[in-house]
Image: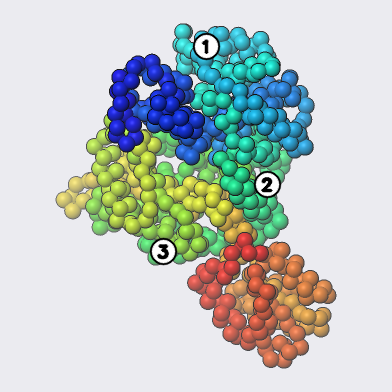
Amino acid sequence: MKITFPDGQERAYNPGVTGLEIAAQISPSLAKAAVAMLVNGQLRDLDEKLVADSSLVFLTTKDTQGLDVMRHTTTAQGLARAVKELFPQAKLAIGPTIDHGFYYDIELDQSLSSDDLPKIEEAMRRIIAENNPVTRELWPAEAVKDYFAKRGETYKVEIVSDAIAKGQLLPGDQLSIYRQSVKNGEDFIDLCRGPHTRATGQISSSFRLTHLAGAYWRGDSKNKMLTRIYGLSFINDQALKAHIAMLEEAAKRDHRKLGKELELFTIVPDAIGSGLPLWLPKGTIIRDELEKWAKEEENKDGYVRVATPVLTKESLYYCSGHLPYYKEDMYSPMEIDGERYYLRPMNCPHHHHVYLSKPRSYRDLPLRIAEYGSVYRYEAHGGLSGLMRTRGFCQNDGHLYCREDQAEEEFIKVMKLHARYYETLGIKEFYMRLSKPDLGKLEKYVDAPEKWLKALAIIESAMKKSGLPYIEAEGEAAFYGPKVDFQIKSVVGTEYTISTNQLDFLATERFGLTYRGADGKDHPVYVIHRAPLGSHERFVAFLIEHFGGHFPLWLAPVQIIVTGIAEKHNEAVVQLVQKLREEGFRVEADESSEKINYKVRQYSLQKVPVILVLGDQEIANQTATIRRLGSPKQTTLPVSELIAQLGEEVRTKQLPAFHSNDL
């Protein structure tokens, strides 16, 4: 049998040789460092036998997939066994890896607190030090069920039973079981897809259990609430410490924490409902400023604005295809005058009817429609998170209707609009992700492979010409057309999909979207879906964390505080506040008798960008002393000059002259 290595070298081996045996023949150090292997691109345990010609790649913890295997072993063999030893009545559910670490969901008959984490960690470190062998075994599905049923592991039994009921497991199918051979005790056995490291000693000691959370079994609030134990895992202490420092910074910037402290939004589950935020006055200012900006930028690009209802007849969604295919993400219908109506999950069908409101000629195109439209989509309770994941949100939506010969240029304009927004906001790390179809299975994409390929060619050409960074993802396309996701990174490294753009030809067919060409015949339009600023909710959440609450002057809810050194200066304070308001600034007066240093500290905590101080000298000279957030310096300027400078800063949407980490 022939084995091909990453460098193209080929070697002959006898069928039945294991990956570990091959690694040992190549180099003892490789056999020691390897934690798993890729066989024909598939992740496998090192002790699995190779029986046919294959490509082979060995993985160590220096590789992303190898590190993931090590992290998975940490949770499946380290954390799970430690919990079972400390809390014998615990029932194990699932323990996957996540970015930078892992978690395990467990049912316990007692409450855990953060005080319990050190002793669980201590047990895990002992398990690692034991260096117990971990081996993969294949058991019949029924044997797996029987084994875990006898031990009261109801979640493992349910996983297997559900797979059998859904036809995912057939009679005679086997499941992988991992056995940790314990020298002085009962072997630890768990159901897992794997792969795992060969021994617990290959688990890095650079890990930490970070926190506890509640999690419904399978994310369904109708199921039992389990205890979720989270952990981090890295290949060395330096990487672990760096990540913990980043997490501490992220906690300071958490939009849920800052949103409450800065009075931006609130969520009232009992009275209003989970996932339905209330925007407070200061948060509404940020929304309004973003929407005003979007209108200005869209006007530059020739958009027209529309307004459409959130409540719509059922028939519209059968036409669009949302029913029945998207039904699980929609809220239940309501009966009005004997007809069924839905809260809309998307704005597209409404915009298509705006297009259809009159006949269109080739001279009318492109037609660019924009709307900040409210939509409602079901989100499981366990998936809700502040403003990041909500059940109702207002989207920076837009649809472009164009001829085929215009589609590429219009797509480029959409991409460059994204880039303008990101540059203004100081978002330096972003890229586009092109989701492409599996070219070997084009028949599954709306039965129109030729249209698919044409649309894909248009988007690929546009992306190359845009000059913006992008990657391609094979086989991830939606069924109705190729799409481009914009990925942005926060200052603490968290990556978000903030916007999705699509070139859609399915809507053209479903809604009969055509234009009269120069030849006097009707032709189908191309539809581009775009939402550069995503939703108010998600984008504001990102900006809160991106700026750490220290918004640039143009976006800050309160831009300026004016205060006096003494109460005798309050009349001048009120007069200056009025003047600044007339100039369009968002400004408040502080007429309290507190000392200046106290006031400066107070408004720094509230993250107000500018504090103006008036005393005898300032009033006499028609000046003001300015203190900027993040700077110990203060400057005295004539009021007229100050107004001009701050006005220019707002007009040009300048970023703060400091990084919020500096505060």
Residue marked by disc 2: 267
Residue marked by disc 1: 139
User: In the displayed structure, does residue 19 sit left or right of residue 12?
Assistant: right
When asked about the image quadrant of residue 624, the answer is: bottom right
Q: How many marks?
A: 3
Residue marked by disc 3: 299
Disc nearest the viewer among 2 and 1: 1
Q: Amino acid at mark 3?
A: Asn
Among the two numbered marks 2 and 1 on one chain, the one whose residue lies closer to the N terminus:
1
Q: Position of residue 68 (x, y in %)?
A: 52, 34
- Mark 2 crowdedness (10 Å alpha carbons): few <14, some 14-19, many ≥20: some
Q: Which residue occupies the foreground of this view, 250 or 3?
A: 3
Dots 3, 2 in contact, CB < 8 A: no
Residue appearing at x 35%, y 16% in the figure: 15
Disc nearest the viewer among 3 and 2: 2
Residue appearing at x 56%, y 8% in the figure: 143
Dots 1, 3 in contact, CB < 8 A: no
Q: Quadrant of the N terminus?
A: top left
- Mark 1 crowdedness (10 Å alpha carbons): few <14, some 14-19, many ≥20: some
Among the two numbered marks 1 and 3 on one chain, the one whose residue lies closer to the N terminus:
1
Q: Position of residue 456 (x, y in %)?
A: 29, 43
How far separated are the C-alphas under marks 3 and 2? 34 Å
